[in-house]
Amino acid sequence: MAVKSVETLPEATVLFAGDSGDGMQVTGTQFTLATAYAMNDLATLPDFPAEIRAPVGTTYGVSGFQLHFGSIDIRTPGDEVDLLIAMNPAALKVNLDRVRIGGTILVNSNTFEPKNFKLANMKSNPLEDGSLDKYRVIQVEITRLTRETLKDFNLNQKEIDRSKNMFALGLSLWLYSRPVEPARKWIVAKFAKTPDIRDANLELLKKGYHFGETTEQFVTRYEVAPAKQPPGRYRAIMGVQALAMGIVAAANKGGIQILYGSYPITPASDILHSLSQYKNHGIVTIQAEDEIAAIGTAIGASFGGSLGITGTSGPGVALKGEAMGLAHMIELPLVIINVQRGGPSTGLPTKTEQSDLLQALYGRNGDAPIPVIAASTPSDCFIVAYEACRLAVKYMTPVILLSDGYLANGSEPWLIPNPDDLAPFDIQYAEKTNKVVDGENVFWPYLRDETTLARPWARPGTPGLEHRVGGLEKQEGSGNVNYEADNHEYMIKIRAEKIQRIQADIPPIEIYGDPDADLLVIGWGSTRGAIEAAVSRSNLAGKKVAAIHLRFLNPLPADLGKVLSQYSQHLVPELNNGQLVKVLRDQFLLPMVAMNKIQGRPFGPAEIAEKIAEMIG
Amino acid sequence: MSDEKPDSNGRKPTLPPGSPSAGKSPMLPPGAKAGPTLPPGAKAGPTLPPGAKAGPTLPPGAKAAGSKLPPASPKLPPGMSPKSPESTEKLVGGDGSSAATRADFTSDQDVRWCPGCGDYAILATVQRMMPELGVPREKVVFISGIGCSSRFPYYMNTYGMHSIHGRAPTIVTGLKSARPDLDIWMITGDGDSLSIGGNHIIHIMRRNVNVQIIMVNNQIYGLTKGQYSPTSEVGKITKSTPFGSLDHPFNPIALVLGAESSFAARTMDRDPKHMKEMFTRAHDYRGTGFVEVYQNCNIFNDGAFFQFTEKETKSDRTIYFEHGKPLVYAGGSKGLRLDGFNLESIDLENGQFGVSDCLVYDETSRDLAGIMSRVYWKPDFPQPFGVFYQEDRPSYDDMLHKQINAVIERSGKGSLQKLLEGGETWEIE
């Protein structure tokens, strides 16, 4: 056996890429799990095509899974890739620009043949034409080694070839000194009913691992030490799971039934998939006939005293606009989740973007402000989902929750929260009449709470509180239909004022980075990791820069104006063509600098740090 | 919730088809006492059926169907006046124990429909019926979309929502799914449910959500001031179709049957007794009880249904069917029989045919319902009224909660802590 040297790295970024059918998402997920067991901090970025099974070997069928892990604080899936595992020429072609100069490229050399070059639209063999000279290339005959390993197994050729990702996984686990046990356990459970396939996968995992040890091709093996993380029990969590659990937490702490109405749409469908499993947690799910029906069922449930939630992505929100206006008008609690994707129209269904902020803030007829809150990391989706539910009920209003494709599918280690630590979620239903008119006790559905301006929530089934709500303008207090000029103006203002009063629930802004900074970076949503990593790096380089991250986009925090005024320069990085920057310029009349990336991919810290350097030298 | 027990609304499980419904005597076909002679105008051929080849260019000033009928002098429908003295009359509940009255179900809001509108009769019928159903008022919810008839919930002193155009079925589905204990009525119109809300109406049908749907069909858009609707006949002259409409109309009963409706009935605003019977049957049915109501819009489509509703013609132009009864009409002088798959109108007085030759209606037969639903504005056939179809099929909300209860029984009540700690975890010291 060759003697290998071991190099310790503070962090590493690995990208698995292959055909949609090559099992790269599974490989990436299992590598992530092993990395979590190795107690590294980590962040992931799955990147898959909109087509389910695009033609084999083509560039548009390439599916990728990027993982950034380390012994240090990991905030993003990584700027540049240290190791690219490319299962075919197309995967290499699509992802080559993400690999750092000097980085390692491991290819399945059996696939580097004329047929695949043609499918990937490549003129020559990149392994021979010098185009990879700036990288360290390792050629492994993964297909041949897989076939040889499994030649005595009772499997057909297709089944054998489909298992080759386990060889790649085994090899990668060896290369970064990760434990094999989590993947072994997963295979045993996953293929419990098909022992032949189970045994084949286990054998390949082992062979891949041993191949690393025995082959002369690898002279170095890497280690990444455990990260310093707060003590406690952890699990890996994807944003979409965290969001679903936040909803369950709201049902549990509020003691309220939640009805989730949704129509399948990428990348929001997984919320429906998750919640439909939680029927014993007080969650009712309905797969509606369309986006409008989905929000309609949620509004119906809220009228009945349950909490209605609907989830979708941008195009679906466009369809729900009228119903959101109704919910605002009748002042019922409701949560609308938008897992944003590349737009406009059908856009880039599987890619991430932050381009629905203005739609969330303004996308309705009439003056119909709705609170908007955004999650900033996969695990933050848990807290934000819980908050959205809590505020919807407290202020009797629809609330829009913005997530995005990167948050939904990205994962990170999560210190499992204690439900007792969540903010209290008290629900008060109206039980009695609240007004005397002509000596008679009556119920006025629009008689507001003095502090929050919320109206009372009377559930059908409560005797004596029978009342009607509707989309027509109503008289303040009684709720009767009313078309009078002064009343309408008053109602528009009071509904807006109610939303503004949510500021009372927003904690003071926390400033990240240099307290004496000149430049303030303002972000929202999933860019938090990249922005704060960039600010940390810049601070280390002696640059006076700080950052704030907005969870509340409407209303904005009460102290935002004061915070902004403390800095001479402002930078607003967004994954869109400039949306938050418009809102901030409008409200604070400051010359904000926009930084926009509209490529369906998240920011990396390096590009933001570069912009910071450009602005403050 | 067990299927065998009445729910908290006091509803009974679906009666086996053909069971005599308690306290109800079979209705005579309307006009049974009328003479066999055809009323004037009937011979002139019935009005243009929807979809008839009328040619889109009618002479200027020509009025569409209905107005060709004998000079109509619409009577004020019952209950038109919202403040009529009868609104305070005491009605005893169906079980004799309820002291609720029509007034208890009447809100303090002024009714704002046009004088003479058929909606008054529908509202009055519903308000009179509610105490007899024996459902506590606070358990009753009326949900509507947008349109003239969709103002209905404001006039009912129950829980209610006037929602958005076409979407009432979605709100109703969510409400009933969350609160199966409520007794939910949906009010909609032909434009609301068949045009903008077409997708939702078909899906609530296939799901069979346990609610009642009153679909007020006046074959016109009223609230937007008189455009043709999806049930208007071809060639309709309206503000938006000055040279006649081109769209082939929907046949609402055939549409919902095609969408897997489990209960479909038709009635008319001018026959409060039949209307009440149909509403009550829809209420007693545990599933989506769909009732189409022909309603006269005396402003924009006056007389659209007069051939079915007015004394002079209705005997010959309508047939009221009942489960287990032969299909007889025109005061017993005519009947319908099946000749293979084809329906045939037969003369029961010329000695060739008798009542025993008539088709005996079976409302549990989807095939018969299909045939009868196609008897639609046919010049040689009477328009059918009554329950076309009723099927014993579990409702969506019953199945939904049965499934939830089964999961709870199998896995126990969910623990948040356990859920959060699920999957692979590790400890950091």
Image: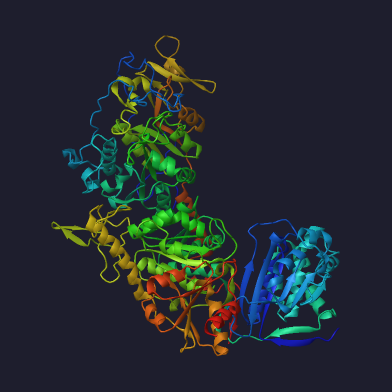
Number of marks drawn: 0
Query: Which color mode does the image show?
Result: rainbow
Residue A428 in sight in this render: no
Q: Position of residue A596 (x, y in %)?
A: 54, 70
Q: Nearer the viewer, residue A535 or B5?
A: A535
Q: Residue at x 73, y 63 (%)?
A: A22
Quarter of the image with the N terminus of chain A in it: bottom right
B409 or A469: nearer the eye?
A469
Q: Quadrant of residue A38?
A: bottom right
Displayed quadrant of residue B97: top left
- Is B25 left, or right, of B395 in this rendering? left
Residue ID at (60%, 62%): A350
Q: Position of residue B26 (x, y in %)?
A: 34, 28
Looking at the image, the residue that sits furthest to the left is A439
Residue A248 in the image: above or below residue A172: above
Q: Would residue B185 be visible to someone looking at this image?
A: yes
Horizontal relation, residue A268 to residue A169: left or right = left
Q: Residue at x 49, y 70 (%)?
A: B415
Residue A376 image position (x, y, % from top left): 51, 73
Is A592 drawn above or below residue B276 in the view shown?
A: below
Relative to A36, A557 lies left or right: left
**Quadrant of res A20:** bottom right
| Above/below status of A36 relative to A539 | above
Q: Nearer the viewer, residue B209 or B26?
A: B209
Tell me residue A422's x, y (percent).
Answer: 43, 76
Can you say which quadrant of the picture contains the C terminus of chain A? Answer: bottom right
